[in-house]
Image (cartoon, grey):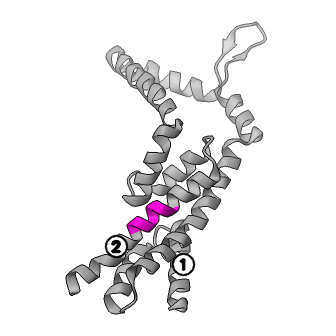
Amino acid sequence: MIAVLLATLAVGAVSAVSPVTPVEPYLVALTATTSYHPLPLGIAAALGQTGPKVAMFLAARGVIRSPRLNQWLAKRTATRTTVDGRPQPGRVRRAVSSIAARLPQGVRVRLKVWYDWVAREHRRLYEPAFLVPTLFASAVVGIPPLLVTTVLAGGTKMRAVVFAVVCFVGRSIRFAALAMMPGLFLN
């Protein structure tokens, strides 16, 4: 049983970083063809996935908070002052302005309304009251994808322990439920 749990943990860890090797079919096949209890297998798979996800969370936190990245972004988006004192937008803003200038006025107004809405709602994503349930739903259901939620959470003030616990509990529920499915249909 220990070898099977370690193998399940390893498959979970690989599936956390490689989307082409999902752990779900492995769990279903394992519980359908053997007599191992599904709960420890689901917990082992969740533990295997949580470790790499925490590493991604911490890596995203380091990259997102990197002074070098922030300087690079500021340089490309900030407005600069030219020699004659006139403001000149950065490359990204110039490109967006160039594209927007070619659009009809009605489309530009609609895009502005949409942009303002996205900017306003984007701030809500960083509130812990919104992020923890989103992370939990992502871990259990998979929508939004856990990889996206992991990177997003890395850019917030969420503590790594909170991330790890929410991710582990959500993944345990998901994988234990999936591992129990063959028993419901085969017995």
Q: Nearer the viewer, residue 9 or 120?
A: 9
Which disc is residue 9 wearing? 1
| Residue under the image location 61 percent in, 59 percent down | 54
Determine which quarter of the picture holds residue 92. Answer: top right
Among all residues in the image, which is located at the extreme right? 83
Q: Main secondary structure of the magenta part?
A: helix
For disc 2, the marked residue is 178
Which span is picked out in magenta?
168-174
**Is residue 24 left or right of 85 when viewed as pictured?**
left
**x%, y% of residue 135?**
47, 50
Amino acid type, residue under disc 2 in the picture: Leu
**x%, y% of residue 109?**
37, 16
Amino acid type, residue under disc 1 in the picture: Leu
Q: Can you say whether 80 is above or below 175 in the image?
A: above
| Residue under the image location 44 percent in, 60 percent down | 170
**Can residue 59 be found in the magenta stretch?**
no
Which quarter shows the C terminus? bottom left
Of the numbered discs 2 and 1, the one sitting upstream in the chain is 1
**Can residue 173 be found in the magenta stretch?**
yes
Q: How far apart are marks 2 and 1 (CA)?
A: 15 Å
Label 2: few (<14), some (14–19) or many (≥20) C-alpha neighbours in 10 Å: some
Under circle 1, the secondary element is helix
